Amino acid sequence: MPPATTVGPRMATPDEPLRCAVLISGSGSGMEALVKAQRTQHLPHTTVLVLSNRADAHGLERARSLDVPTAVVERMDESGQGRTREEHETLVLKQLELHEIEFVVLAGYMRLLSPHFLNRWQHRVVNIHPSLLPHFPGAHAHRDVLAAGTTISGCTVHLVDEGMDTGAILGQCSVPVFSHDDEGSLSARVKIEEHRLYPTVLSWIAEGRVHLVNGKARVDGEPPLTVC
Ligand code: GRF
């Protein structure tokens, strides 16, 4: 067997939970569901920062009403000048350091992370994507699923690498696609499962149960489960 790399920085417990930052760009319903699960289910991970790259993201209001600290790092600086990707990521990295973050959770964060960021956070960044990867990566998953006439879709939690939705798959949930679906109805059905899947997979990681072998994830030594 090749050596396995543990995903996540340490074994966490509900009493010493993994300190997560959730990065968002938009509505933040996944972030809100995660924070509520963490607060009601005694999980080994906690959200201590919500960071947005957009000051107008509705998710920031949700975070404030949950009393989770927030930060905004926009693409433009105060004088309206565009920041380079590296400048932007350097400011995000500073916020992570400031809040003593141990793990990064992307939840509708609409920017790709570069090696400048990921080399410092190897195996410590996850994303949730609204399709059954490797099928239908990219920003328009629901539209692409409907256009293809597929009858099953779902969501995937995966490790983040430099590609678009290409990192090792950690867990998935499936949902039916109906002939009368539009993007809104399919997205709503998938989000119900997203909101169950993310806390579950984060618990596996926090408990030290997820390893990478030859670039593929193993949970308790087995290929990732379809959770639902
Ligand atoms: C979710 O569907 C997630 O899978 C995708 O972006 C959407 C974010 O929704 N990456 P919300 O902001 O959590 O409501």
Image (cartoon, grey):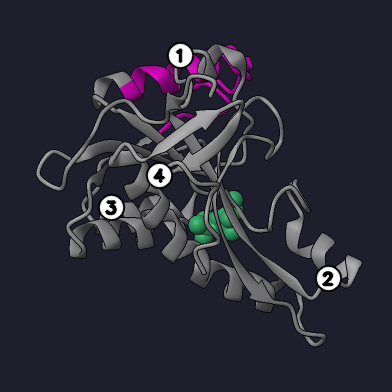
Pointer 3 local density, CA inside 10 Å: few below 14, some 14–19, many at least 20: few
Residue 220 tag number: 4
Tell me which label, 3 or 1, sits earlier in the chain. 3
Image depth: mark 3 or mark 4 in front: 4
- Give how far apart the Cα atoms at labels 1 and 2 are: 38 Å
* Membership of 86 in magenta stretch: yes
- Give how far apart the Cα atoms at labels 3 and 4 are: 36 Å
Q: Which residues are magenta?
A: 72-96
Image depth: mark 1 or mark 2 in front: 2
The residue sitting at 43% across, 23% down in the picture is: 92
Secondary element at tag 2: loop
Amino acid, disc 2: Thr
- The residue that label 2 is drawn on is 150
The residue sitting at 55% across, 61% down in the picture is: 226
- Which of the four quarters of the rendered structure image does ligand 1 lie in? bottom right
Q: Is residue 183 left or right of residue 86?
A: right
- The answer to which image quadrant residue 209 occupies is top left
Q: Is residue 32 or residue 216 the one in the foreground?
A: 216
Amino acid, disc 3: Arg
Q: Is residue 63 or residue 164 the one in the foreground?
A: 164
- The residue that label 1 is drawn on is 120
Pointer 2 local density, CA inside 10 Å: few below 14, some 14–19, many at least 20: few
The residue sitting at 69% across, 36% down in the picture is: 166
Tell me which label, 2 or 4, sits earlier in the chain. 2
**Contact flag, marks 2 and 4 (Cβ < 8 Å):** no
The residue sitting at 17% across, 57% down in the picture is: 42
Pointer 1 local density, CA inside 10 Å: few below 14, some 14–19, many at least 20: few
